[in-house]
Amino acid sequence: MKKTEYTVRFATSGARKGWRDLVATIRNPMADAWDFLTRTPAERTPTNYPMRGELQFVQRGAARHERWQHKPTAQGDARIWFYIDGDAVLIEQVHTHHPNATK
């Protein structure tokens, strides 16, 4: 691993399952998503941005983290919710369809 790369971990078993489900249906975009999340997870793009409103932050223990959303494809409904803790990207939720909470 390069010093500039982030380590990706799954914060929940549901996120791990959701990731596997998406890899089974959109393999190439998920490989691109993995590359993006290990290199530049805090870069704001049309498909990667911080959440807003009630979903803006996630509390883990005593720490509060900014929650981000990544769309593996520009046109698709899949969403990856994650937060950054030091040099780790923690994937919190993976939605195969657009989550109702953000509609």
Image (spheres, helix red, strand yellow):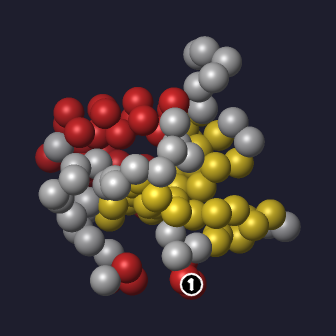
| Quarter of the image that includes the N terminus | top right
Q: Position of residue 83 (x, y in %)?
A: 59, 55
Numbered disc total: 1
Query: Residue at the front extreme?
Result: 45
Q: Which residue is tagged 1? A: 54
Q: 90 and 20: which one is in front?
A: 90
| Quarter of the image that includes the C terminus | bottom left
Residue 86 visible in the shown view: yes
For label 1, the crowd category at 10 Å Cα-Cα, with few meaning under 14, some 14 to 19 and many 20 or more, is few
Q: 80 and 9: which one is in front?
A: 80
Residue 80: image quadrant is: bottom left
Residue 12 visible in the shown view: no
Residue at point 70%, 48% (across, down): 85
Q: Position of residue 2 (x, y in %)?
A: 60, 15
Q: Give the SS element for disc 1.
A: helix
97 above or below 102?
A: above
Q: Position of residue 4 (x, y in %)?
A: 63, 23
Looking at the rendered structure, the kind of residue marked 1 is Glu
Residue 24: image quadrant is: top left
Query: Residue at the top extreme?
Result: 2
Q: Is residue 36 left or right of residue 8?
A: left
Residue at point 26%, 71% (across, down): 98
Residue at point 31%, 33% (across, down): 32
Q: 103 and 23: which one is in front?
A: 103
97 above or below 24?
A: below
Q: 36 and 61: which one is in front?
A: 36
